[in-house]
Image (cartoon, rainbow, N blue to C red):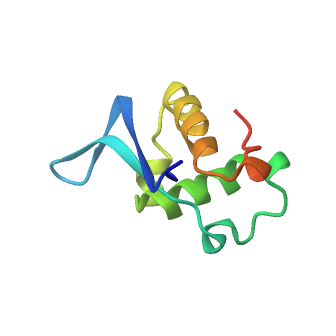
Amino acid sequence: MTRLQSITVPLEDPIPFGKNEVVTELVLKRIKFKHLRNIDNLKTMTTDELGHLIERISGQPKEVIDEIDAEDMILIGEELAKLLPAGLATIPK
């Protein structure tokens, strides 16, 4: 079985950013240990910790992540779980 290296999540509600940019999707990279630093427990991750994780693996700035629609966040959480090894796939939905 081939391991996922990244997942592209199309956003239902695109995010205007900067002068002329609109973020229409997030590309979530494979999660590495460095991305999980400062997260004490994946099962009880706070929304702030989740936001920082998404920033790190998507390469998008905080200003974009803060504007993600709640319904898009649910989709992102589901896709995020696919990037974690089975024993760690406990990202809250």
x, y (%) of residue 83?
58, 50
> Does residue 81 appear to the left or right of 12 in the view shown?
right
Residue at image coords 59%, 43% = 82
Considering depth in this image, is 62 or 43 the residue closer to the camera? 43
Residue at image coords 45%, 41% = 67
Residue at image coords 76%, 52% = 88
23 is higher (above) or lower (below) than 19? above
User: How many numbered circles does the render carry?
Assistant: 0
Residue at image coords 54%, 48% = 1
x, y (%) of residue 25?
34, 41
16 is higher (above) or lower (below) than 12? below
Instruction: Note whether residue 36 is visible.
Output: yes
Instruction: Note whether residue 45 is visible.
Output: no
Considering depth in this image, is 57 or 18 the residue closer to the camera? 57
- Residue furthest to the left in view is 20
> Does residue 66 appear to the left or right of 82 in the view shown?
left
x, y (%) of residue 65?
48, 49
* Picture quadrant of residue 18: bottom left
Considering depth in this image, is 36 or 63 the residue closer to the camera? 36
> Does residue 17 appear to the left or right of 11 in the view shown?
left
Considering depth in this image, is 87 or 73 the residue closer to the camera? 87
48 is higher (above) or lower (below) than 13? below
